Amino acid sequence: MWRYINNPRIVISNNQHIAECDFNIYTGTTNTYGPSSAIINIPNVVSDVRRLYDNHFPSFPFPDPNEDEIYILNVSQIVDGFRITRTGRTPDTYIYPAMIDPVEDKIILPHPVKRMTPLQALSHELGHWFYDRIIDDIVNESAGWYCRDDVTGFDRYTEIAALYCQEEISGLIQNRQSYHITVQRMLEELDFFRGTSDDVISLIIQKLLQR
């Protein structure tokens, strides 16, 4: 079971709608995400994405996200991003349709979600989450790196891994030309990886570590 927040406060900043999120306050727990007409089972999607990683790294001890590592925000309207309240510090604002909080590693999924289906959003963020566990392990075993952000190119390649998982679970993105040119370039690199080997996630990690 994972946590959900009903009707978080929405503020407008720079003409963008931002949902406020406090990880210490939640409404309840759930195993599902999405509208009643197309609801998805979170444990099934976690298993599907984990299986993609297990196929490439069968000996890696992947954990599943804990109860407090996925938050669903049932918002009154589509939002552009999130403002996360943290004890003793200024709130952090991020402009993403869904995201992993870079400070606390918690997945944030709004419902409804901007420009994505619930399955696309969940599989994408889980793609990040499992990929980041591998990079954290590499960082812990390496001299000269304190955290994953010290690895040059980390942001790019965790995004490519997330796009790979999203497409494997929810189907190929059909409207690629509507995305920012940076994302289009990532998808082109992902296509190259797919054309090179079936071990796509391994190739993404190798490419990252070669930089």
Image (cartoon, grey):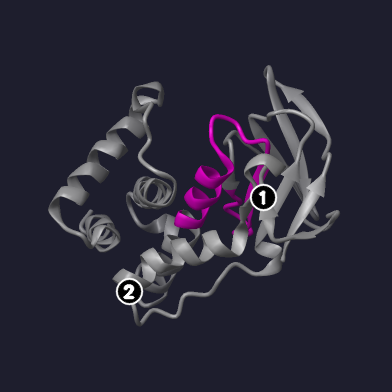
- Height in image: 146 above or below 9? below
Give percent across and percent down for residue 20: 77, 39
Residue 203 is situated, as x and y percent measured from the top left of the image, at 22, 59
Residues packed near mark 2 inside 10 Å, few (<14), some (14 to 19) or many (20 plus):
some
Residue that label 2 marks: 57
Choose between 122 and 203: the one closer to the eye: 122
Say what secondary structure mark 2 lies in. Answer: loop
Few, some or many residues within 10 Å of mark 1 (<14, 14–19, 20+)? many
Looking at the image, the residue that sits furthest to the top is 15
- Residue at 59% across, 67% down: 65
Give the x, y percent position of residue 70: 66, 58
Res. 75 image quadrant: top right
Residue picked out by circle 1: 33
**Mark 1 → mark 2, Cα distance in angstroms:** 28 Å
Q: Which residues are magenta?
A: 100-127
Amino acid type, residue under disc 2 in the picture:
Phe
Residue 62 appears left or right of 22: left
